[in-house]
Amino acid sequence: MTAEGSRNAVSQYFHFIIERRFGDAEKKLEEVKQAFGQSKQEAGYLKALEGLLLTYRSSNDRYLYLTNVELSSKNVEALKKEFSEQAESPLHADYDRGYFSALVDFMRAVGRLRPWRGRQPRQASERSSVAKETSEAQ
């Protein structure tokens, strides 16, 4: 698969995750794995892709950061900025930079697809109860 083909496959994978089409996402992930090389950065990128599937498929999201963040344009931009800083940090190893690069790419896909359109925003009481449960668990 060419570099362009692997970028398209990753883009489709993100689309499947966002749409909660996990069977299709699993198949696409296998395709992506075949296309990637063996570098540390690629290994980190692939591990993040696997983690996204596990995170969004999980029925118990109490301790999963990304599933507890309300997706909005503002939050997606803030996460993209934070993940970009981590991906570019010389303090991180190649594996970590690859991992954060995948999260940046995922946030870009979320920003393009804007899954929050047409959804009712969480009520303030729901957000505070999630935050309260998370802080109590720590």
Image: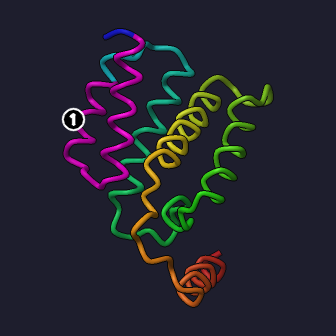
Q: Residue furthest bottom?
A: 125
> Quick one: SS at disc 1?
helix
Q: Is residue 104 above or below residue 136?
A: above
Q: Is residue 106 above or below residue 10?
A: below
**Residue 39 placement, left or right of 132:** left
Residue 99, image x and y in percent? 56, 34
Q: Residue at x 21, y 42 (%)?
A: 24
**Residue 4 placement, left or right of 131:** left
Image quadrant in which you'd find residue 7: top left
Was residue 24 drawn as part of the magenta stretch in this picture?
yes
Kind of residue at badge 1: Lys
Question: In what quadrant of the picture does the N terminus appear?
Answer: top left
Residue 107, image x and y in percent? 54, 45
Residue 84, image x and y in percent? 69, 37
Per the image, the residue denoted by label 1 is: 27
What secondary structure do most residues of the magenta stretch adopt?
helix
Q: Which residues are magenta?
A: 3-32
Q: Residue at x 48, y 48 (%)?
A: 110
Q: Residue furthest front?
A: 118
Was residue 14 drawn as part of the magenta stretch in this picture?
yes
Residue 118, image x and y in percent? 39, 68
Along the line of sight, which residue is nearer the eye, 102 or 12?
12
Q: Residues within 10 Å of mark 1 (few under 14, many from 20)?
A: few
